Amino acid sequence: MTIGTLITGGVHHPYHTGTYKAWNGLDDPNKIAWNQYTVEVERRTVDPDPSDWAMGVGTPIPSFTDDSQLRLLDKLSSAVRGHEFNAGVFLGQSGEVARSVVGTATAFAGIFRSLKRGDLEGALRFLPRSVGGADIRAARKKLTTRDIAGAHLSLVYGWIPLIHDVQAAATAMEVLANPPRRSSVVVTRKQAVVLEGSQSPSLYSCPVSGSVSRRIRYVMEEELSAARSLGLTDLLPVLHELTPYSFVVDWFVPIGTYLSNLAVIPHLKGHFEITEKYRGSGRCIAIDPRFGGSTTYEHGTFVRSPLVTSLSVPLPQFRGFSQLYNNSQRTLNAIALMRNLFK
């Protein structure tokens, strides 16, 4: 067992300038086995005011959220499969895809006929409707903003995903035709954090910003079957994707991501090596004008968890309405959707 503490510049105290390091773990000098290990490092620079009053900073360690874990598991699921093609969803949407292709071909034919007659206005009416696959009668009517919105939605949620599915299907066939794939995969995710480290918030503020990151290395004992890799063994993700406007729900509560992970993660055979890091820094700011001085602060932790042979999939959490307006593309999609729904 390795355990120790290293202190420089004074004791580990929130009002002292200095550094602090502590570690605890299992010895493994040859690095043969995965060993559980923890390291904590801290550095403070305290500049007290003339009255020797100084600002103390706490050491809150934020956690890796369930939402971040869900996103990380989604990356792991894709990495294990080696592709992002879901044959079940693709087959379920095949009827809609066929209608879009036929409608688009018809609209492009209308564009060509209009241009041959020199009818530029008619060709322009067909153009946005070609993406949406409008029929000839609809394309002859006066163009409206609803048509533009419909064309945008068809492009974003129809044609672009279709092209992606075709490319993903080709990748899936290549991956499945050339086993074995990788014996291990590694995925990481970093989560930004902002917190308050002040020990006396009414007197001074110590905003701390940093990040928490988690890394998962999965060592395979058994590969996924071809059917599970292609999404053919679980109907729930397929039913969710085929539900109208399910993508809107996923903006705020990632049900689709949860169901996709549930179809893969519990079925992985092997072990998982998980490490987590936190780094944060900040500077204290006096609120009470009677006090001065300053304190700068840096803190870091490294945790190597024990080996595990299974991972649980956390339930999807509400991500907040900020998911709508903090993404310009999603905001544009929402505007187009609202225009398309209301005449």
Image (cartoon, rainbow, N blue to C red):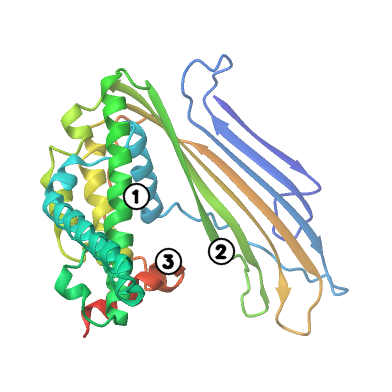
- x and y percent of residue 92 in the render? 12, 49
Calculate the distance from the C-alpha at mark 1 to the C-alpha at mark 3. 22 Å
Q: Is residue 321 above or below residue 316?
A: below
| SS at mark 2 in the image | strand
Q: Is residue 239 left or right of residue 262?
A: left
Helix, strand or loop at label 1? It is helix
Distance between the alpha carbons at the discs numbered 2 and 1: 20 Å
Counting residues from the start of the chain, the first of labels 3 and 2 encountered is 2
**Nearer-the-camera pick, 335 or 266:** 335
**Mark 2 / mark 1, whichever is N-terminal:** 1
Q: Quadrant of residue 106?
A: bottom left
Between 187 and 295, the one lying in front of the other is 187
Determine whether label 3 and label 2 are within 8 Å by CB: no
Residue type at mark 1: give it.
Leu
Give the residue at x 17% y 56%. Answer: 102
Compared with 209, 306 (above or below) is above
Regarding residue 340, the answer to whether it shows in the image is yes
Q: Are marks 2 and 1 in contact (CB under 8 Å)?
A: no
**What residue is pinned by disc 1?**
70
Numbered label attached to residue 194: 2
